[in-house]
Image (tube, helix red, strand yellow):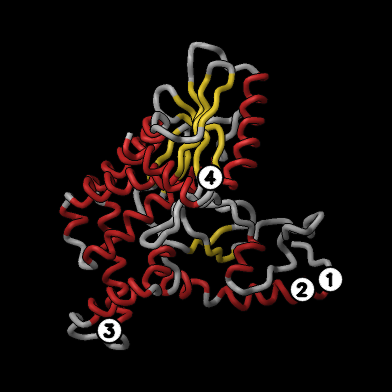
Amino acid sequence: MKIVDKAQAEAVAGWQEQESGRQYWLKHVADDNVTVSTYGVDDHGDATPALAWRSLGTSASPLTRTPDAGSITDCSGPIAIPMLTSRAWVRWSRGRLMYAGRVSRGPFMAWAQSPQGRAVVTETAARVRFALFSRARVAQRRLWRALSAAARDERVVAVIQREIDAYFERVGELAYGDGLPRTSVELHRLVVVPCVMINGAANRSIATRLGALPAISSLEGGDELRDFFFLGLIQEIEAAIARAQPSPKRPLPAGATWISVGLNREFVWRVPFEGPAWAGHHYVFELTRQPIRRSTRKAVAEKIRNFEASLPSLSRLERSEILRRARAA
């Protein structure tokens, strides 16, 4: 490596000084969310080293590229750095949503710090007979290991993948709901399908099918931990779809005769007194024998912009009525 100035020389010295503790860090600190990655794109995400270090509360090394830098400092090889990344449970791969076969620890740790999670940890800690330092820590680790093992169970993995495959099929089925905002484009229907309807149906199905499996029904955390897992799966599905960015030019399949050509993640359809809000909606376009031309895609994009401008004018009562009629259909 070519050292350009004194600041870079000090940085290299710092890396060498930290290397002695690197193996200890990997063995005792790293978990499923921590990856040691060389400079460049991490295998489990697209976060840059500078962004990863910012998440750790540490400044980026002058020997790495930063988002604002116009060029990269003179380096002859990669530098191994610890990166904190949250591995997605669900990813868009080869034209379909795929379950990763495991869950990451980050969302669980966040849940464990919530009021519901702390209550479960406290209840579990009361059943811990011996702990060298903290019963709560032992209980939290026990709950995580049980959930992680259940998420890797073969039967659980198979059911989750079937539910993920069925997610977009429900989008197409719900597009026929009565009262949903809709318009037409060259004999094709364009329908607004609220995410609260899609996710509500998905949550009920996931809870029923996964809850019947021994690996899930026997979780020590009870209903609260199971609910976290089920809702976490839906959240990950939504995030994977958002990363795919459906559009008229790059639609996503939504059943046999529908495609998703747009996604809004902010529009509030209901006030979440209980449970998640599941804001937003899909713009679902009907497939017919009529070909989809460039002019069709441009017309669809214009209709979506019109919906984005007009939907916020709906009152809370009107939004509730739309959901009621669509669910009753």
User: From the viewer's perspective, is the residue at label 3 or at label 1 nearer?
Assistant: 3
Across and down, in percent, residue 159 comes to 26, 42
**Tag 4 and tag 3, C-beta contact below 8 Å:** no
Q: Dot 2, crowdedness within 10 Å: few (<14), some or many (≥20)?
A: some
Examine the rendered structure and indicate whether residue 85 appears above or below residue 290.
below
| Residue 237 visible in the snapshot | no
What residue appears at the point 37 percent right and 38 percent down from the top-left corner? 325
Q: What residue does disc 2 label?
A: 9
Cα distance in 3D space between marks 2 and 3: 45 Å
Q: Which residue is mark 4?
A: 242
Q: Quadrant of residue 113?
A: bottom left
Q: Name the residue beneath numbered marker 3.
A: 135
Q: Which residue is mark 1?
A: 5
Mark sitting earlier along the chain (3/1): 1
Q: Secondary structure at mark 1?
A: loop
Quarter of the image that includes the C terminus: top left
Please say if 105 is above or below 241.
below
C-alpha distance separating marks 4 and 3: 39 Å
Mark 3 residue type: Arg
